[in-house]
Image (cartoon, rainbow, N blue to C red):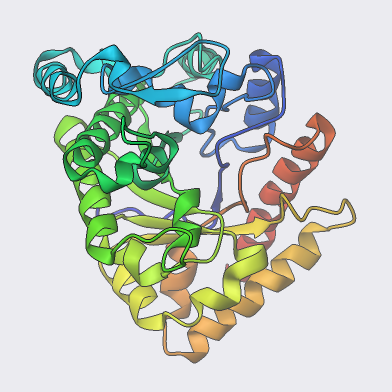
Amino acid sequence: MPEDFAPYFTATGVGTLPHHDPAAAMADVLAVLGEMPYWPQLPQRDPSEDMAPQYAPALEPLVSGTPGSRKVRAFGGLSREEALAAFYERLMSAPLESFAPEAARAAGWPVFLEAVAAADRAAFPWLKGHVTGPVTMCLSVAGDDGKSLLYDDDAAEAIARGLGAAAGAQAAALAGLGRRVMIFLDEPALSGFGSAFTPVSRETVLGLLGACLEEARARAEMILGVHCCGNTDWSLLVESGAEVINLDSASYGQHLLLYPEAVEALLARGGAVAWGAVPTLEYKGNETAKGLWAGLHVLLAGLEEKGLSRERLASQALVTPACGMGGLTVEQARAILALTAGVSELAREAYA
């Protein structure tokens, strides 16, 4: 963790946008998120930009997908053992850039690289990327027995390490542009942790997140976060070793207040909370930056009341939308991005 990591309510985004034109999507991001822009996934443009198929190429031949389709499958016509052996051979010997997003399934990625490369060197001090998290990816792929690969320990660890390499490939490419880098593992599946719908142990989740983070850190330097857009066991994400936890605080912020010790541990080691203060799925259109900041301030005050440092809570905070916006309209997404920047500005004014 860099000693000078103090984002102080920096605004950034989460994953998907509803645009069909990647250049227009990138322009909307850069217009309001100048400190930490991110590259957008565009699932309305192409179904293979959904979370699972977008990262299938990084996991071949263990996982494969079809361009233009949301479907992914395990082992690509090989036996399980053949696919695992071939994947690990690739993981150990293939160039890192082969794990980066493919333009055919990630149209926003090359546009992002080009926009940053063309900008003044002082612009965009931070860049943000994202990778589908291992729990979510494993749940999206079934083995030959019809069961999710989450319950195949060897295949699940391989997927976690492949996604770690994918994070490393993004970080290496972005760092090559002369900026500092943050990469999030997007884990919507963890919102079901502990429920009967996702019967998986704490040890399994920690093992997969740990393998993914370990592989990423071995490949490139970056700040690593985990995003979960539902309620979960937040101490689990802190225990995973991630430097940032990103939550939908607009809907679930009060739940984080149940974990003051975990938040304190995260901040004490130099990590940060990325507050998803602007609703996405629950967006109504009548929200104001002032009202959303008031809601976030209540949460920060609640943690202060539990003994956490006001200064540390402010300096080690980011502001994001609650989740991705791939299912919204372009106009709604633009409004949410602007609100995110607005909450960031108001937070900084309040804590100046």
User: Looking at the rendering, which quadrant does residue 202 occupy?
Assistant: bottom left
Q: Position of residue 320 (x, y in %)?
A: 59, 50
| Between 233 and 198, the one nearer to me in the picture | 198
Q: Is residue 27 left or right of residue 65?
A: right
User: Looking at the rendering, which quadrant does residue 34 occupy?
Assistant: top right
Residue at 23% from the left image edge and 43% from the top image edge:
152
Q: Residue furthest front?
A: 145
Residue 176 visible somewhere in the drawing: no
Above or below, comparing residue 114 to residue 2 in the picture: above
Residue 155 visible somewhere in the drawing: yes
Task: Give the total number of marks visible in the rendering.
Answer: 0
Above or below, comparing residue 304 to residue 245 in the picture: below
| Between 300 and 347, the one nearer to me in the picture | 300
Q: Position of residue 156 (x, y in %)?
A: 25, 40
Q: Is residue 269 left or right of residue 248?
A: left
Above or below, comparing residue 31 to residue 241 in the picture: above
Residue at 24% from the left image edge and 45% from the top image edge:
213
Residue at 67% from the left image edge and 17% from the top image edge:
45
Q: Position of residue 236 (x, y in %)?
A: 33, 66
